Image (cartoon, rainbow, N blue to C red):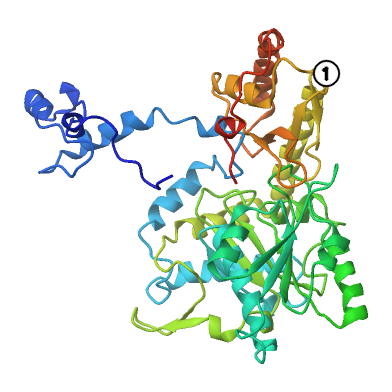
Amino acid sequence: MPLHKGPVTPEPEHDRHLALNPFYGLANPIGGMTDAPPRHRLPDGPLPPMSAYQLVHDELMLDGNSRLNLATFVTTWMEPQAGVLMAECRDKNMIDKDEYPRTAELERRCVAMLADLWNAPDPSAAVGCSTTGSSEACMLAGMALKRRWAKRNADRYPGSARPNLVMGVNVQVCWDKFCNFWEVEPRLVPMEGDRFHLDPQAAAALCDENTIGVVAVLGSTFDGSYEPVAEVCAALDALQERTGLDIPVHVDGASGAMVAPFLDEDLVWDFRLPRVSSINTSGHKYGLVYPGVGWALWPSAAELPEELVFRVNYLGGDMPTFALNFSRPGAQVVAQYYTFLRLGREGYRAVQQTTRDVARGVAERIEELGDFRLLTRGDQLPVFAFTTAPDITSYDVFDVSRRLREHGWLVPAYTFPANREDLSVLRVVCRNGFSTDLAELFVEDLRRLLPELRSQPHPLSHDKAAATSFHH
């Protein structure tokens, strides 16, 4: 499927113009109508700013309501003060640290705060950077793993050795991209039975002298469960005792790294484990910032090869940079620092606990309906997955997803990967802003749909691939 699909209408329609309301014309309403811009080519001349705004605004009304999107992990609500700060900083180039030294300082402080939150042995020695999100952060962590492995195996690579990365089949698609882009063999641990994420012993069994690392996910996107990071590290410790292989672990904490430190303080998953060499998170998920910020951290400079850090001076000073992107706005980094200051540990704990309480409450009420079976209960990430009960034959999860969309709720239905392709589920992501009141409305809408769904002769979603609305 092409990345961009152009107009499929006949050629005369290709030049069809946008519909411009006479009231949008600032001085000459009729002229505004006749000068309406085309849809698929640049207009010949400019429009008044209000006319251009209104055209775009009206079309965007057809988007879904982000607050009712229970598919996304991404933050959909922030305080007005955060919005003001972001507007003030959207013209600042994050890469230009010489011109915007205070913005750079706020980034450095955020890295230090995360290093302390994730129990780095010496937070002042930790290194890290902001990114556009966890996908970029994972790419950077993977690059560091590969480069460290390549230096240890310089006598064999790139000649006879092919690097591999061990992870569960449930990892986010960014890890598939990393392996593809950087020519690393993905070694995937499949799901088995009611285990929907990485098994420590199975992961250790796939490791060999060409393994650059093991990825453990603190909060699987498939069902919201934590992978057992400490057990993975213990299995790799035992592997090293038997074979001498020293395999590092990267923790993909896109969501859980901003939940577990506040709600699961006794869970050991972070830099307290010496084998954990890097951690990433998404500031724009449970870090509570609007889309566009992630973080990658290493406990010391030893885990981040110096040759991956580039230095540029043409912006006015000598500045190190380690990122895939170059120019990007500083607004999201400033918003992250604002949120850290605004909430502190106790504030984050209160927000995440409320979100988890909502998730557990919704999961329990859905279970009480009798038509569904819970796979997870929202007691790790504030996320849970459920499927139809064994005796439900008149409808499936794809029917439920489609009908909920009619009420404005976006709830993804999808099949699980290798070894559990037979399992199709719905997943609900609870975020800050999905209040108890909204949760009540959601459950009631689902309850009202059940009589009609039960009366169907059979599930209506014959093409499961077409029905699936979740692909990452």
Number of callouts:
1
Residue farthest bottom in this picture: 155
Residue 319 lies, with reference to residue 129, above or below; the image says below
Left or right, residue 324 beside residue 361? left
Residue 394 lies, with reference to residue 374, above or below; the image says above
User: Which residue is depicted at the point 10% across and 43% down?
Assistant: 44
Where, by quadrant of the figure, is residue 13 drawn?
top left
Residue 320: x %, y % from top left: 49, 80
Residue 396: x %, y % from top left: 69, 23
Give the camera-side residue of 218 and 2: 2
Give the camera-side residue of 371 and 285: 371
Give the camera-side residue of 41 and 409: 41
Taking the image as drawn, is residue 268 in sight?
A: no
Left or right, residue 206 beside residue 88? right
Residue 115: x %, y % from top left: 69, 69
Residue 43: x %, y % from top left: 15, 42
Residue 385 lies, with reference to residue 140, above or below; the image says above
Where, by quadrant of the figure, is residue 422 drawn?
top right
User: Which residue is depicted at the point 78% across and 38% down?
Assistant: 378
Taking the image as drawn, is residue 237 in sight?
A: yes
Q: Quadrant of the N terminus?
A: top left
Tell me the kind of residue under disc 1: Asp
Under circle 1, the secondary element is loop
User: Which residue is depicted at the point 41% across and 62% down?
Assistant: 328
Left or right, residue 134 beside residue 33? right
Residue assigned mark 1: 391
What is the crowding at mark 1: few (fewer than 14 residues within 10 Å), some, or many (at least 20)? few
Where, by quadrant of the figure, is residue 31 drawn?
top left
